[in-house]
Image (spheres, rainbow, N blue to C red):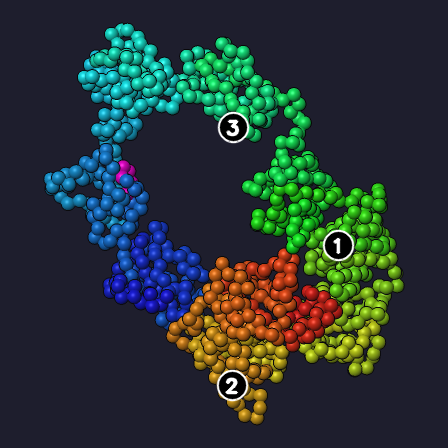
């Protein structure tokens, strides 16, 4: 940006006269080193103001450069501290003039200094035809001057045009000859309106494209006259054109003339002839070539026929039979022959064996209605063209199918599902399934509609399929037996002190409050502080406790547990003694307070009831105050961070008793917020980052973190960082040692061995560099790390997926843990992590969809050794809860 600004300054040098007065439209440059918001020049708007970052509007029009610079400096010094090198310079001065009135582009125009009125008119597109050039007006403030611009153009102007100043207005009036309505006159318009009088020309009017009075030419026919008027419109009745010559009327059938070409039917035409093309109206057509179609057709009526017109031609011209027509009992009526019965179905089955009668003018085709058209005929639609829909839809039945239709078309044709339809488990039975194809498949229509999935995820149907829509079970109090029809995988269980305990239908779009309200809520004897939830995800069983009373007091939605189908909820009966057995939790936790305690609970249980530590919590030095001890040793300390990272034994957790108090302090804040608060952080737990990073400073650090962690905590290298010359001072031993890191090479190769090991006390320095630190921008590549043959940065586009990326990297290694590939999506809406089971996808692609991958994301393939650590972290999550682990990760 600064190089571009330097080029602009060389092309447009600054004004050397510092006493120049600033006006609207001037472009100025504000020199403020180190502030990227001031790299681009600013333009003074029409109100004479500059819009500056962090300051807003400042009026500078009418001030000299020094006055404007002093005024802006006073406003900037409130926001910016270092203004020693601040300077205002003029890059370009422009005149801002309004050009109004009868011009092509009225409005405000920008002109170079010393521009005249002619240049202002040219900038506004020039005066329009019809402008009054001798009455131009120049308005400046409350004064106005009228001048003769036409005399200037003719070279007759004795005095020059008035000079322009910024803020002037030029008004161009219209000529009084234009009248109140503007009309464009040209030669083409005169010609189209006619070029002769009525006595010596032909008057042509009616349904013609260009009616008027046109000159007569020798040997001119009525067809020539109609073509002179550009022909008839689509609404003209060409069979009844009227021609009056020498006061004698004639009726001309243009259609019959074009069919026969007989010139004897042309009426005479001479000067003074009048030709009229009437509009076509509904009337009784009784020409010698008319046939009639009546009954169940799309458009019954009278139709013109010609030699060679057949029965199918006339029927097709009438739109064909309707769906109510009985095509086996068609009648052909004639004045000269007996009535003929026609079976159109037989003709369509064997056209070569069933001949149709010839059509004659005056014949009548009558297509009767079916006797009972509401009764569906199964014989007309064979099984290879039909799909059957049964169950809870408004109109079940057997429907004709075409490959252009979709599942949504068929469902709409069946009237849509009923209110009690189970849309999450629609069954599709395929009678023609092959040996490798499943005969019965299921489709979750509710999930499809709520998650806005693409249409290509609809089931692909084919003729012969059967679709079954089951009903949801009724209220269990009405009929317990009907619950047999509900799958266990779609059910959730609720017991204890609720209004209606039992087994309820449940899906992923519902939550804890939904199932609680379905069970009529807790009763008056329910202990809502000790709600127990058994999570049965199919692999392991975990029990969590939930304080519903705390949610009612705070309204914090984060306190609500996540429940899924298969889980069990139990609300015990209230115990009056339980409230006296309590442990107090205060400090940096999600929901500090007083919680019921019993001997079966652990330190992690009570911490989970408090919502877990916040991301600002100092979990390395948690204090437990023992109420039953009166000595100075009544305070115990516990390092939860070491317990998590080192995998401590549960026997090492602090032993709590009723009445104990847990205090969790906060970590020091960001050094940019409060430098003094960093005194609370030990130097043994700190690392230092300086140089070209987003947020240099002193950061908390532990042995579980690495170089990339501390670099990301400092907001990463900025655009001026030299990634090839990073220095690390290791101060952990008796002597200091400095190592150099080429971080650019790591980004290009993905070699983890290039990254140095840093510990608390080390100093990282990122020097400044002139140029880009990566050949390929991060927003156009995907980073692939971990146990693959060729880790690194790969170019990526929207046509690729994760399989293409792994193939380009040579595939995973033999030691790769492909069941838990991790993807960090940073391309949209903030960082979001997801996992992908590659082995599950290979075995069952339908159950394990490919994850969405965009340029800028990061893919990590762990090794088999990491899977053990992953299981350990999973065990810890079971103890603390999902929310607690996320907060601890953010705090670390």
Q: Nearer the viewer, residue 427 or 506?
A: 427
The residue located at (20%, 45%) in the rendering is 118
The residue located at (53%, 13%) in the rendering is 333
Residues drawn in magenta: 99-103
Q: Is residue 779 above or below residue 263?
A: below
Residue at numbered disc 1:
489
Magenta: main secondary structure = strand
Along the horizontal axis of the image, is 439 left or right of 129?
A: right
Q: Outermost residue, bottom direction? A: 734
Q: CA distance from mark 3 to mark 1?
A: 60 Å
- Which numbered mark, 1 or 2, is in the foreground of this view? 1
Q: Quadrant of residue 573?
A: bottom right
Q: Which mark is residue 729?
A: 2
* Secondary structure state at the residue bearing disc 1: helix
Q: Nearer the viewer, residue 819 or 472?
A: 819
The residue located at (49%, 58%) in the rendering is 799
Residue at numbered disc 3:
352
Q: Are marks 3 and 1 in contact (CB under 8 Å)?
A: no
Question: x and y percent of residue 344 in the render?
Answer: 56, 24
The residue located at (53%, 67%) in the rendering is 807
Q: Are marks 1 and 2 in contact (CB under 8 Å)?
A: no
Q: Is residue 404 visible?
A: yes
Q: CA distance from mark 1 to mark 2?
A: 58 Å
């Amino acid at each position: 940006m600064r190089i571009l600004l330097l080029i602009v300054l060389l092309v447009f040098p600054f004004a050397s006269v510092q006493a120049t007065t600033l006006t609207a439209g001037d472009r100025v440059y504000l020199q403020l080193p180190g502030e990227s918001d001031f790299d681009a020049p600013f333009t003074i708007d029409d109100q004479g103001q500059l819009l500056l970052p962090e300051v807003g509007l400042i009026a500078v029009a009418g001030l000299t450069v020094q006055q404007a610079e002093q005024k802006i400096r006073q406003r900037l010094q409130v926001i910016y501290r270092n203004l020693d090198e601040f300077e205002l310079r003029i890059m370009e001065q422009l005149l801002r003039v309004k050009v109004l009135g009868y011009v092509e582009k009225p409005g405000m125009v920008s002109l170079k200094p010393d521009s005249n009125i002619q240049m202002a008119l040219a900038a506004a597109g020039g005066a329009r035809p019809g402008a009054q050039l001798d009455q131009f007006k120049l308005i400046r403030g409350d004064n106005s001057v009228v001048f003769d611009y036409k005399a200037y153009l003719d070279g007759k102007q004795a005095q020059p045009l008035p000079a322009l100043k910024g803020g002037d207005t030029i008004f161009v009036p219209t000529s009084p000859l234009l009248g109140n309505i503007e009309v464009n006159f040209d030669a083409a318009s005169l010609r189209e309106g006619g070029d002769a009088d009525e006595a010596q020309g032909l008057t042509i009017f009616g349904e013609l494209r260009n009616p008027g009075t046109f000159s007569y030419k020798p040997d001119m026919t009525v067809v020539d006259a109609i073509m002179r008027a550009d022909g008839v419109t689509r609404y003209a009745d060409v069979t009844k054109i009227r021609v009056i010559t020498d006061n004698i009327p004639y009726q001309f059938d243009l259609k019959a003339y074009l069919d026969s070409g007989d010139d004897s039917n042309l009426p005479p035409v001479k000067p003074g002839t009048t030709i009229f093309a009437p509009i076509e109206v509904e009337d009784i057509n009784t020409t010698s070539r008319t046939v009639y179609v009546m009954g169940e057709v799309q458009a019954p009526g009278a139709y013109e026929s010609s030699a060679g017109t057949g029965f199918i031609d006339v029927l097709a011209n009438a739109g064909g039979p309707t769906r109510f027509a009985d095509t086996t009992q068609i009648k052909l009526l004639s004045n000269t022959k007996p009535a003929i019965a026609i079976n159109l179905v037989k003709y369509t089955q064997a056209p070569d064996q069933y001949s149709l009668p010839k059509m004659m003018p005056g014949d009548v085709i009558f297509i009767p209605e079916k006797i009972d058209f509401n009764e569906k005929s199964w014989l007309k639609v064979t099984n290879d063209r039909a799909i059957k829909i049964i169950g809870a839809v408004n109109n079940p039945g057997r429907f004709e199918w075409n490959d252009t239709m979709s599942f949504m078309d068929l469902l709409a044709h069946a009237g849509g599902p009923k209110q009690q339809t189970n849309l999450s488990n629609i069954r599709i039975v395929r009678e023609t399934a092959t040996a490798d194809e499943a005969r019965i498949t299921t489709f979750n229509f509710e999930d499809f509609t709520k998650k806005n999935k693409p249409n290509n995820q609809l089931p692909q149907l084919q003729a012969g399929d059967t679709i079954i829509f089951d009903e949801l079970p009724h209220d269990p109090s009405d009929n317990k037996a009907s619950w047999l029809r509900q799958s266990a995988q779609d059910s959730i269980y609720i017991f204890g002190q609720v209004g209606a305990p039992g087994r309820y239908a449940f899906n992923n779009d519902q939550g804890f409050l939904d199932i609680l309200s379905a069970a009529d809520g807790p009763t008056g004897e329910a202990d809502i502080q000790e709600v127990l939830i058994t999570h049965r995800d199919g692999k392991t069983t975990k029990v969590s406790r939930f304080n519903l009373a705390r949610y009612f007091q705070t309204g914090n939605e984060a306190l609500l547990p996540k429940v899924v189908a298969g889980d069990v909820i139990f609300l015990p009966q209230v115990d009056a003694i339980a409230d006296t057995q309590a442990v107090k939790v205060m400090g940096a936790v999600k929901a500090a307070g007083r919680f019921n305690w019993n001997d079966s609970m652990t330190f992690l249980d009570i911490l989970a009831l408090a919502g877990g530590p916040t991301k600002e919590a100092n979990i390395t030095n948690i204090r437990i105050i023992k109420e039953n001890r009166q000595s100075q040793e009544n305070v115990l300390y516990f390092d939860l961070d070491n317990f998590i990272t080192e995998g401590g034994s549960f026997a090492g957790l602090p032993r709590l008793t009723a009445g104990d108090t847990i205090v969790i302090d906060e970590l020091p804040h960001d050094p940019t917020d409060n430098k003094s608060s960093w005194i609370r952080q030990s130097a043994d737990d700190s690392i230092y980052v300086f140089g070209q990073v987003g947020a240099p400073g002193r950061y908390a650090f532990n042995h579980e973190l690495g170089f990339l962690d501390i670099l990301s905590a400092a907001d990463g290298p900025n655009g001026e960082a030299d990634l090839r010359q990073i220095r690390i001072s290791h101060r952990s031993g008796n002597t200091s040692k400095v190592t150099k890191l080429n971080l650019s090479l790591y980004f290009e190769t993905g070699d983890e061995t290039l990254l140095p090991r840093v510990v608390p006390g080390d100093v990282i320095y990122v020097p400044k560099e002139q140029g880009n630190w990566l050949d390929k921008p991060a927003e156009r590549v995907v980073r692939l790390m971990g146990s693959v043959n060729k880790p690194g940065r790969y170019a990526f586009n929207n046509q690729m997926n994760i399989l293409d990326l792994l193939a380009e990297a040579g595939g995973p290694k033999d030691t790769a843990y492909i069941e838990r590939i991790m993807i960090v999506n940073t391309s949209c809406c903030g960082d979001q992590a997801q996992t992908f089971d590659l082995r599950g996808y290979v075995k069952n692609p339908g159950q394990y969809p490919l994850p969405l991958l965009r340029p800028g994301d990061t893919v990590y393939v762990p090794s088999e050794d990491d899977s053990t650590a992953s299981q350990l972290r999973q065990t810890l999550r079971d103890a603390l809860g999902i929310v607690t682990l996320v907060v601890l990760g953010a705090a670390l």
